[in-house]
Image (tube, rainbow, N blue to C red):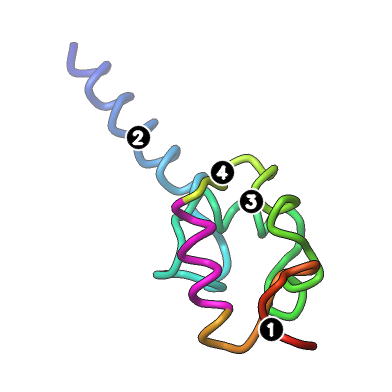
Amino acid sequence: MINLVIMAKCLNSICAVSHNAKGTFLQGIISAPARRALEKEKINSLEKLSEYSEKEILQMHGFGKNAMEKLKIHMMENDRYFKNSDVGIR
């Protein structure tokens, strides 16, 4: 029984470490799953993010409406917009 408890603690720490987003891009703005989705696509700046449309970003696993709204607000605050956006002039 003690061995099972020890194994569970080890597995828990391994899982926690392996699922963390590596970079700090958008940390504190959007959730870790959404940041991992961007990281997987090598999107690590607002400039790269602005090369995508909202629809393309929403199709990524880990992105939902809540993350998109937070991201849009953050981008507008930094004068960046999604591709094909009706807002902003580039």
Does 42 appear above or below 18? below
Query: Which mark is first along the chain, 4 or 2?
Result: 2
x%, y% of residue 87?
Answer: 66, 77
Does 64 appear above or below 25? above
Q: Residue furthest front?
A: 86
Q: Are marks 4 and 3 in contact (CB under 8 Å)?
A: yes
Q: Is residue 10 left or right of residue 38?
A: left
Labels 1, 4: front one: 1
The amino acid type found where label 2 is placed reads: Asn
Mark 4: few/some/many CA within 10 Å (<14, 14-19, 20+) = some
* Range of residues picked out in magenta: 66-75
Q: Residue at 56% across / 47% down in the picture?
A: 63
Q: Are marks 2 and 4 in contact (CB under 8 Å)?
A: no
Query: Which mark is first along the chain, 3 or 4?
Result: 3
Rendered image: mark on residue 12: 2
The residue lying toward the viewer, choosing from 88 and 60, is: 88
x%, y% of residue 14?
Answer: 44, 40
Mark 3: few/some/many CA within 10 Å (<14, 14-19, 20+) = some
Q: CA distance from mark 2 to mark 1?
A: 45 Å
Does 16 appear above or below 76? above
Quarter of the image with the N terminus in it: top left
Q: Residue furthest top?
A: 1
